[in-house]
Amino acid sequence: MRRIGYQLLVAISLLGAAPAATRPRYGGTLRVMMQAAPTTLEIPTSAAPTDYWDSARILTLLTNNLVELDAAARPQPALAVSWQNDMNGKRWQFALRHGVKFHDGSPASGAAIAKILGDIHSGWIVRAAGDSLTIESDYAMPSLLAELALTKNAIVKRNADGIPIGTGPFRVAEFQPGGHLKLAAVEESWTGRPFVDAIEIDLGRSLRDQAIALELNKVDVIETTPQPAPGGMQHGRTSLTVELMALVFSPNTRAQDVRLRDALALAINRKPIQSGLLRGAGDPTATILPNWMTGYAAAFSTQPDLQRARGVLADSRQPVVTLSYDPRDPQGQLIADRIALNAREAGITVLVSLSGPADVNLVRIVLPSSDPATSLREAAIELGMGQPLIHGNSIEDVYAAERALLDGHTVIPLFHLPVASAASSRVRHWEPDRTGDWNLADLWLEVP
Amino acid sequence: MQWRGTSGTRLRWLTALAFAVVLLSSNLRASSLTDLARQLAQRTVAITGPGAIALEIVNRSSLDDHSVNEVRTALEAQLRGQGVRTAKPDESVAQVHVVLSESLREYVWSAEIIMGQDEHRVVLVSMPHAVSTGAPASAMPLTIRKTFLFTQAQPILDALMVEMPGGTRLLALDESRVAVYRQQAGRWELESSLSISRSHIFPRDPRGRLLLRRDHLFDAYLPGTLCRSSAAAPLTMTCSDSDDPWPLAIEEGGARAFFAPARNFFNGTFSPGIGKLSTAPSFYSAAVLPRSGYTLWVLSAVDGTLHLLDGMTDQVIRGVRWGSDVASVQSNCGAGAQVLASESGDPEQDSLRAFEFPDRDPVAASAPAEFDGSIVTLWTESNGSTAIVVVRRGGTGGYEAYRVSVACSN
């Protein structure tokens, strides 16, 4: 009896516990699928959000920036270990990390980094002196650190074939443009050797193909739509709202009368669109920047007000407005149709059309930084607006700049949207960044 | 921790410490909220002027109900102090709609002020999120006792308590420094910081070990790097590249193993060896159990198996679902020494349990002690009777260090 009791205790000790927390393990190949099918490994200009995310996620594996932003959007050292700036923010000096090398073995010296940044920013004067770097401009750059953390400011060279040569934890081992990309772990990476040996990325795979491949256990990390993950998907993750869907009026729009744009903004009933067509994903918004970035979104009403919309129009005679959308966006047409319906209730005629130049476009853009001032500047560029005048670093300064940008209603923000992804059960430490990056260098694979 | 006095004294001391920390933290926060409320009131009154306003407050932040009530009380008091009283909308010159919100960085409170039909203004105030100063001490009077030590944002690789002139010090090792804390008014205050200079690249899952020494205060073992402190005050530290094996045993001169400098494990080579054994499979951690006539070593291998080394043989135990980290503690209870091992794969909550090896198989000897996060570090302290546990919290991502010991149940 005593023996049976002892054996029972042993059995409990051996088998009773849940799977134990283990340290990261080295080895294996991570299998990834992406929708985008880039022919070059760079951030495309005016990219669709999908293309941006996929290119950015690849470049993040290959490169580093001078500075990176942490989870609270605070600048942290990367290739630069420290920095200081003058009183008016026009001159910044950076001390660079010693001993970092590009994947081709050349040193990531001040001179090399100065050339890369100087080529990207013609308005900056970038000088190197040994292991320090100075960036100067004629205008104040209070958000320079956040700007340097943008993927487009990654420190990267290119070989004769245009393949990126960075300082990141992976290097390109093989690239078939638009088809397949293989990355190999960099043993001497200054951030520490990644846990997996390699990453194989299948490009140009639809969301449906990716979901099926995950079900069949043929892939480890995929993109998904930001809705509840279907059966079989392990570790579904949804980011913060890092994309903006908005109406953008063309410069030559027939809707030149600000009353028409104001009335349209008041007529749109965002909530039913968000809960129905977007299946509950994201948040209705009347701001360019999401609340998690600024905290002031509540100061901009998203409530429709048809009575006020009709009052704004009064008895004015307004032209018919054409509305276009991105045909690659699966919800684009349905949302455009719903907006046209809302507009009609306010007495505005909106025709949804993909042919010819449109008066207003339904667009979706990426908010590429968790720093509000930087994201506002980048969004303004993407939306074709003038550069915002942000006088300082406080949230009140950003609020004033955004309020001024939105006053003319040339852009009507509609929704902030997240991005989503999922990983198979053999992937461990699957903790994508809340702002959309995948952090694949920190993943490891469970022993089969 | 070199506790002095009786267990009753310890309990009273811990209770007082916990109360002091909670009170201090609570007062600090209340003061900040009141200050922010004062700013919002000032900006609001600058627009409305004195008189009656209809005030509505909506909370869309992480503030709890108690804090929101504090804000409401403070805001109304500040408004009253500036000649503004709250009233019904139809008796008011303005409607003020306050939203308590927040971003990743800061609390952001907005007041939307509506005066008449046309005038519509918004004022904002903001305050950075407070940096967490850690939770008060907690101890579970179960078989495994855990005592909270401190918290920080950066990964804590090891910690130890040491008696020095002027009182107990807490030494905390991370990738960049050894921080020396001294207890002041119930809190650990940073006394000095010894930087780690290194030329070696640390792996992504860096590990480190702090050990007290006889001829100087401590050694800090890091991947490819060894740091040695001075023997006396003022405390200094010198670091150099090193592939010396790391001590596995507490006593100096005991078994040592080589740590793979670009990985997160020991490569399985001992120097000096364990009895006649000089190699074993790569392993993450080791625990030692004294036996009559020999010493039993328990290795947590990289392949997930346990290896029991008695100096002559290497016995493999498969199917034990422990974590990667094990440590031993002398308790003078039960068999006298136990192996601590983490359980659970839930990233939100790991637990630690004591095991004994009456024969060759582990037997649970305690109830699990729960931690709010994943256990990332577990080392036996230099005194041999306690272990340091570091937990990585989900959400905030901060790291918390605990000291654990095994106490007799009866």
Image (cartoon, grey):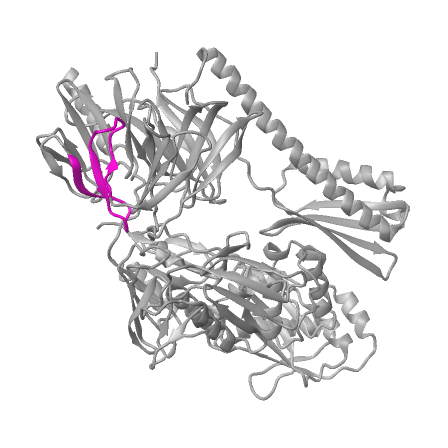
- Residue B209 in the image: state x and y as whole percent: 33, 37
Q: Nearer the viewer, residue B366 or B340?
A: B340
Q: Nearer the viewer, residue B357 or A227?
A: B357
Q: Look at the image and give the residue range highlighted in magenta.
A: B244-272
Regarding residue B190, the answer to whether it shows in the image is: yes
Whether B254 is among the magenta residues is yes
- Residue B344 in the image: state x and y as whole percent: 33, 37
- Residue A240 in the image: state x and y as whole percent: 52, 56
Question: Horizontal placement of A259 versus A151: left or right?
Answer: right
Count of numbered marks: 0
Q: Is residue A363 above or below residue B305?
A: below
Q: Is residue A404 above or below residue A293?
A: below
| Residue under the point 31% across and 56% down | A193
- Residue A83 in the image: state x and y as whole percent: 54, 58
Q: Nearer the viewer, residue A62 or A400?
A: A62
Q: Quadrant of residue B345?
A: top left
Q: Quadrant of the N terminus of chain A?
A: top left
Whether A137 is among the magenta residues is no
Q: Quadrant of residue A288?
A: bottom right
Furthest toward the bottom, the residue is A356
Q: Quadrant of residue A30?
A: bottom left
| Residue under the point 88% across and 48% down | B90
Regarding residue A301, the answer to whether it shows in the image is: no
Q: Nearer the viewer, residue B117 or B121?
A: B121
